[in-house]
Amino acid sequence: MSTTEPTLDGIDLENDVFAERIPHETFALLRREAPVHWYDWKGGTGFWCVTKHADLVAVHKDTETFSSETGATALEDLDEEQIAARKSMLDMDPPRHDELRGLIAERRSALETHGLASDVAGDEADRAFGRVCDTIENDLLDLHLAEMARIEAARARAAEGHYGLCADCGEPIPLGRLQAHPTALRCAECQARREKLFAAAF
């Protein structure tokens, strides 16, 4: 049975293709004929495909030109709130990425040390309690990361001159709300309306 060789005009990088398998022949074509190729993705604006190892290394090292933090790392076109909500280490540039990586490395080392100690001494109840504490501390780290992302987003809005304006209605957010929630994106009325819409969706 003959197979059709892929061409640049016929490249398909939609999600369904990857659900079945990795299209190695497509990436081989890109590396051979267009190692830096723009793809008009149906799910958003589109993206650049960088497929050669040396180019990928150069991109990852040049965080000033190729930022993971500006626009995040998702293929989808996300708004400011969505970017802040899904913020992770992958969506950070140095030095914040390096600082957080160091903190997590310290935390991992402490967890591994705790795990070894639990294996040597203590009954199952002690080990269970230790696992619960580890889970709580990891959850607190996630909350801390999310709050950091919201603060950075608020700083960006301030730099652009629209901090304190509701993202939905465009009206100034009351001072009392900003004092209670400095990173608020919406006025109380718009936030309540949004929460009702999300509640109805689920």
Image (cartoon, rainbow, N blue to C red):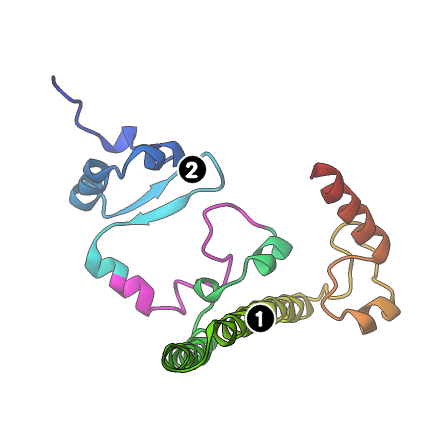
Q: For the residues marked 1 and 2, what is the alpha-carbon distance in whole angstroms?
A: 39 Å
Nearer to me, 191 or 57: 191
Q: Which residue is mark 2?
A: 41
Q: Is residue 116 left or right of residue 150?
A: left
**What is the three-letter code of the residue carrying label 1?**
Ile
Mark 2, secondary structure of its residue: loop
Q: Which residue is mark 1?
A: 136
Q: Is residue 95 left or right of residue 180?
A: left
* Extreme residue toward the front, this view: 123
Instruction: Single out the mark in the foreground, 1 or 2.
Output: 1
* Extreme residue toward the left, this view: 1
Please count the marks in the image.
2
Of the two numbered discs 1 and 2 on the same chain, state the one appearing first in sequence. 2
**What is the three-letter code of the residue carrying label 2?**
Trp
User: Where is residue 118, by image quadrant?
Assistant: bottom left
Residue at 48 percent across and 42 percent down: it is 45
Q: Does residue 67 show up magenta in the picture?
A: yes
Q: Which residues are magenta?
A: 57-78
Q: Residues within 10 Å of mark 1 (few under 14, many from 20)?
A: few
Mark 1, secondary structure of its residue: helix
Q: Picture coordinates of residue 84 (x, y %)?
A: 60, 60
Q: Picture coordinates of residue 164 (x, y %)?
A: 77, 65
Q: Picture coordinates of residue 111 (x, y %)?
A: 43, 77
Residue at 18 percent across and 41 percent down: it is 28
